[in-house]
Image: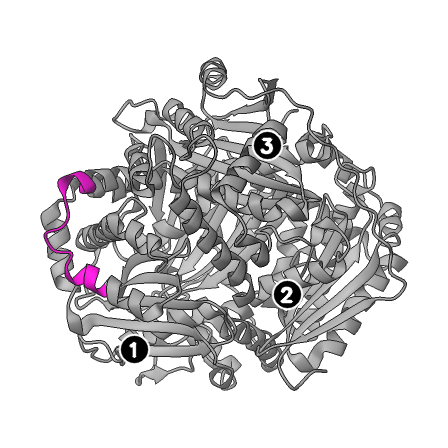
Amino acid sequence: MEKIIFDQLQEELYYEKLNNGLDVYILPKHGFNKTYATFTTKYGSIDNHFLPPGKEDFVKVPDGIAHFLEHKLFEKEDGDVFQQFSKQGASANAFTSFTRTAYLFSSTSNVEKNLETLIDFVQAPYFTEKTVEKEKGIIGQEITMYDDNPDWRLYFGLIQNMYKNHPVKIDIAGTIESISHITKDMLYECYKTFYHPSNMLLFIVGPVNQDQMMKMVRDNQDRKDYKELPEIKRKFEEEPVAVAEKKLVLEMNVQTSKCLVGIKAPNANQSGKEMLKKELSLNVMLDILFGKSSDHYSSLYNEGLIDETFSFDYTEEKGFGFAMVGGDTSDPDRLADTIKRILLEAKGTISDESLERTKKKKIGAFLRAVNSPEYIANQFTRYAFNDMDLFEVVPTLEGITIADIERAADELISEEQFTVCLVVPKK
Amino acid sequence: MNIISETVKAMTGYNIHIVKTDKYKTNTIVWKMKAPLRKEEATLRALLPYVLQSSNKEFPTTGTLRSYLDELYGASLYVDLAKKGEFHIISFSLEMANEKFLSDPTPLLKKAIEFLAGLLMKPNADESAFHKETVANEKRTLKQRIQSVYDDKMRYSNYRLIQEMCKEEPYSLHVHGDMDAVDSITPEILYDYYQNALKQDELDLYIIGDVSEEEVFGVVSEQLQFSERTPKIIHSSNYVSKNNVHEVIEEQEVKQGKLNIGYRTNIKYGDEDYYALQIFNGVFGGFSHSKLFLNVREKASLAYYVTSRLESHKGLMMVMSGIDNKNYDQAIQIINEQMDAMKRGDFTEEEMEQTKAVIKNQLLETIDTSRGMVEILYHNVVSKKDISLDEWMEKMDLVTKKDIIAVANKIHLDTVYFLTGKGDTK
């Protein structure tokens, strides 16, 4: 077991790669009541075209299957795992993103038992035709719930505008039609491909003893027989630099219009330090341009073009990345034009003073974030899957220069990479 | 055992509550102002904190004010409004890095307290009115905030249930006030209202973090002083219990129907049977092991979410679910059956024990966040009780099946609200 010390943060992180390839991290946090653990596979909605182990041909699976699998893993022959967690005083949950599926619990007692339950239930799939059919009704309601949600439609509409081929454009839950094709055999095939321990990461944070915990996990894994898995082969089609659509207007049953401007990243193939620096540089830039202390924010607010829902973010994963800026507005077209103009004219407007101020702000925000065990476990995993280190955020932030920001901005900000999605009240 | 060690001290015009803990990398300040919910004041109160947080004498624009917070290592500032029973509560929250994790030794907590005092005591106003443009801007944003409830159908249907159920009670007022009352607010009227609120509201200051009590008392007593007051006590409005269940069906263009059901529990925080009510809610609908989840979702596949929650200071319980429009009758039937089962005592010791474990876990988790800790402690201010978290958990442990059945039989169904798609009701 390796020990990594973060002096400034006064934290210690323990790490071990187990024999079967599972990465295990433990961050003891004393003084907290709760222990939070996530067990995550590097498998999300974009992994829909792959080579199953032992097969010759690539397969394409229905949209929404990773999320469907996440739901079904909770059900076992003798009932559902939620029951067992709550008997042990824990609350359990899971989520599926574009690139990850995470299973988690938090509890203030019976921590070892709960951890064992978490690992065991994820490692023991049980799918039958009957339970798969039953789930279609439940997930169908989840899909309709999102259909009525204007913010979700806006967000996804924007991503669909950006991507022509990349599966990031597929709604994570799929559609009622696409999930109707899912069978238990397909679930097993996905499971066998992506749920091998060597494709997974376990993160535990809370008032725990690292030696005891690590031993428990090690013993648990040693009892299970995993054969070595060849490298997972995924297939992605070529994606053009330009966006697929420049504009989408969704008419919905709303009273307030919404506007979101997107910029598609042209070169989302980095990882590690390079990616961390780029992601942070672009987020610092967006904060300087659009944060509450910026001139642009004040003038947009005073003109009545934005309100407190206004937000911005740049995010990148292997194969795709995008910036998004927008929110509720009284005049979606004018807001879209203004945001675009600000971004296109950003070059040369960033001062040293605003950079230093924004760095301080981001460092404070990071300290606030690491109060949260959820944030640490989820973000650490996301970073690790992209070969980045969450605990490098502060030193990397400190090192960002105006030149770094301009380099990243030059690459990102270009007319053909812009797109807009609007939600407007139905006439 | 004392899970939270809270020091409370009476200051001039307010109480300070300090919780000293070294588990966070930040310190948190929460300022609370509490007054009875009243129709004439609700919209003024909803506007006030947004005006106060946008600028003040020292920082006359949002840009300069926010730049200053950025300089304090991104101290976060946000305001929030809540209804707790029939009180309308304003909160200002500030969270700033603890400088021991920074290479820069600026005393951030002290600066943040001074900053808060500046927001409250030196607003952007002359002797009789707030700054005109600021009020105009915030009025516009308030209107958007009120309007946005309509666009989020889950929030909307929840609000509509309360509106229908508590028609004759102040509790039906929206936390952000009334759209029609916004226009008539002037910078003078709002300023007058603020002066009154400062004299009459019940005020509480919470400070959570690795702080020195002595130092905090020193800074705070120098910076924040108000007139002494006797906070108002309200007698909960008497509602007329309905003979029949009130059913409201509203049509809109939605794909998923939203079912919201309101019950009167007639039990409030601090009542002897409040603990049994919590266990009741957990067995019935609060969690993913509860009867509602198992029967509406897992067995009948009717919903993705179905849950119940308590309004602890008003004595209400609300069930909410998203279902297909055509499944209305079936969903209601299943939910009613679960309630009947509870009244008959048709639940096991195991379900009770499970629920106790999960609620205990939930409480302990809540106090792992500084804001959660403040919310738990503030229950005592709202209810004028003095219940420690230890006592709360001990009393929950003592709850028996008989207690829960008794509670179940005190609960009655008041209003069923259903937001349904056009043209396919029932």
Percent from the top left, x then y, of residue A364? 33, 37
Question: What is the CA distance from the residue labelled 3 to the residue labelled 2?
Answer: 34 Å
C-alpha span from label 2 to label 1 = 32 Å
Crowd around label 3: few <14 · some 14–19 · many ≥20 (10 Å)? few
Image mark 3: chain: B
Q: Which mark is residue B157?
A: 2
Q: Classify 10 Å Cα crowding around label 1: few (below 14), some (14-19), many (20 and above).
A: some
Residue B274 higher or lower than A83, as above or below: above
Q: Quick check: do tags 2 and 1 share a chain?
A: no
Q: Does the magenta segment cover residue A341?
A: yes
The location of residue B70, given as percent across then percent down, is 30, 37
Instruction: Confirm or deny contact between disc 3 and disc 2 (CB under 8 A).
Output: no
Specify whether residue A52 is in view: no
Amino acid residing under circle 1: Lys
Q: Is residue A238 above or below residue B363?
A: below
Position of residue A226 in the picture relative to residue B238 (left or right): left
The magenta segment: A340-355
Task: Look at mark 3 in the image and give the residue it sits on.
Answer: B196
Q: Can residue A281 be seen in this view?
A: yes
**Dot 1: element:** strand
Name the residue tied to disc 1. A247
Residue B40 or residue B402, whichever sits in front? B40
Q: In which quarter of the image is residue B89?
A: top right
Q: Which chain carries label 1?
A: A
